[in-house]
Image (cartoon, rainbow, N blue to C red):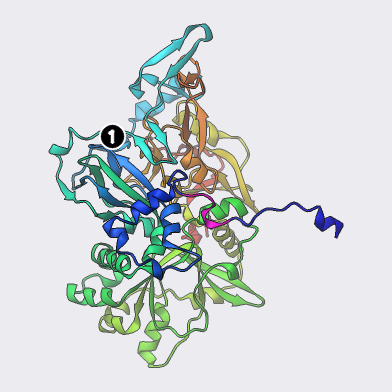
Amino acid sequence: MAELASAATLSRPQRWDSPFDPNLTPGDVEKLLRIPEIAAIDEERFPRSLPLRGVLGNDCRLVRRQSGEIIIRADDYGNSAFLLISGLARVVLPPGIPIEQLGRQETVTKSLWESFSQLWKNSSVKESRDISRYQQQAKVAGEENRVSVDTLGTVIIDQGEVNGPNLKSLLPQLHTVPLPQGSLFGEIAALRREPRSATIVADENCLLLEIRWQGLRDIRKYDPGWRNIIDQSYRKNTLLTHLREHELFAGISEDALQRIADCTLFETFGSFEWFSDFQRDGTDSVNIDQEPLVAAEGDYSDGLLLIAAGFGRVSVKTGNGRRTLTYLRSGDYFGIDELMANWETGEDISLTCSLHATGYLDVLRVPGYALAEISEQISQLTPTNFRALAAKPFSEADDLLDWAVSERFINGTQAMLIDLDKCVRCDDCVSACSRAHDGNPRFLRHGKVLGKWMIANACMHCSDPVCLIGCPTGAIHRMAEQGVVTINDDSCIGCGVCANSCPYSNIRLVEINDKKGRAVLDPATQLPIMKATKCDLCVEQPGGPSCVRACPADAMRRIDFHDMDMVTGQ
């Protein structure tokens, strides 16, 4: 008892320990409740443990944008929606805003001569920059022989205020559609963590209510009006597009597609913030049976599950545990073998394996009866044949796959896999990376290990790039053509949001120097200017990733775990 009495105590963490806007007052909440779109919400429908006032006070924040300022950028990954309280905004239509105005950069592949000349042209100064390109006033602190520059933009993340490029003069030249007061936008990207479909700019000075996805989810759950608005928006703008682009529905009529869409259910499993839990807990607590169950082995198959986003683990019961057969991602489907068997035999066929959400998983549940009229087309698809996978004897690939799923490496489309049995530790890969990036390597040749395999600390260019969420200037982004996640050094402000979000610790903040080796400081604080850096897959190099090309032992490859034969070389 004495030991218990001396134990430390800590209140159990609660969801609203960290409000979206700590400065939002109860008086502000009362004013929000008088906004027509909020006033229409029935507070009585919310449970005592989750009152509407609590959602508004903790999951929302007020954001102001001046005329010409960007509210959301096309292709940014969203985790919040916006309600336009006052002012006027505009949706920018294609061809859109020049990428440099969005904080992006246009990548130009170097010529063979430029690539070769890096051998002797690279700077000997660590993380050196030509600071004149930041288009800021630079001042030299003579007695300290150091350089000071203003930071690029002013960011107060807690308040959501960003002073970035002003597009007021550019707006008349763009094709735009007005968004009037009371408009709700960004809700689909927030709930599905998808890239924003368009850029929205303030046409007049705007006051907006930003609602993070957790609050939006709860308002949608308890208020039928908002649920109807969001669901109709999803079905109109997203669901039909998703179904139309899927190989399953190629060539069917719009009427048939509409009938399927009308009865398709959208379901979400797991947590959008899986990366926060993963960073905190690691893989020690990862257990298949603890992952959210989507479909259970032995259950009757009543339709087809289309994977819309996220990842799902397919497993089968083996002895006292479960064996991972494969994983599913956007575009894959589950239950097609059983569905076709049902149609062929007329008997009820149960599922041969289970599907669990790994991190989070969005699925479209299409009832079997809705697919009956296109059964001949479905029968032309390649069966998933999970039963055959389960019948295969255990191999090295099984251990590697289970490890990759548990460590969430399956998120990567270009994970750096090193065969330690072949690797001679010469560090030629690191040297090649350094030569390709002005003398600064962009990865670390160490990482998590399973047997002879190691995943190095290098950006994996994830299919769910959580590092993109919350970047205030759009500096970190996915390139439209190559699919590479890259950072625009010119617009990066060193806030650290991307580095803190990366669940694999593959993004680092570095102190920069000028070309003469002098530290670059913020004149206001005299603190070093920081920039985020990571592997960019040598997107500017004509031959692709320098690290892979430089390995003399063929020990390194960039892989996607979806193709296990390619991973293991079998």
State the residue at coordinates (23%, 65%): 236
Does residue 173 appear left or right of residue 260 in this picture?
left
- Residue 348: image location, x then y, percent: 43, 90
Residue 140 makes an appearance in the image: yes
- Residue 371: image location, x then y, percent: 30, 80
State the residue at coordinates (31%, 61%): 39
Quadrant where the image shows the N terminus:
bottom right
- Residue 404: image location, x then y, percent: 55, 58
Q: Is residue 100 above or below residue 393?
A: above
> Pointer 1: residues within 10 angstroms few (<14), some, or many (20+)?
some
Does residue 521 appear left or right of residue 456 in this picture?
left
Residue assigned mark 1: 100
- Front-most of 32 and 301? 32
Residue type highlighted by circle 1: Glu
- Helix, strand or loop for disc 1: helix
State the residue at coordinates (35%, 30%): 112
- Front-most of 157 and 401? 157
Does residue 114 appear left or right of residue 570 in this picture?
left
Residue 548 makes an appearance in the image: no
The magenta segment: 14-19
Q: Is residue 18 magenta?
A: yes
Labels in figure, total? 1
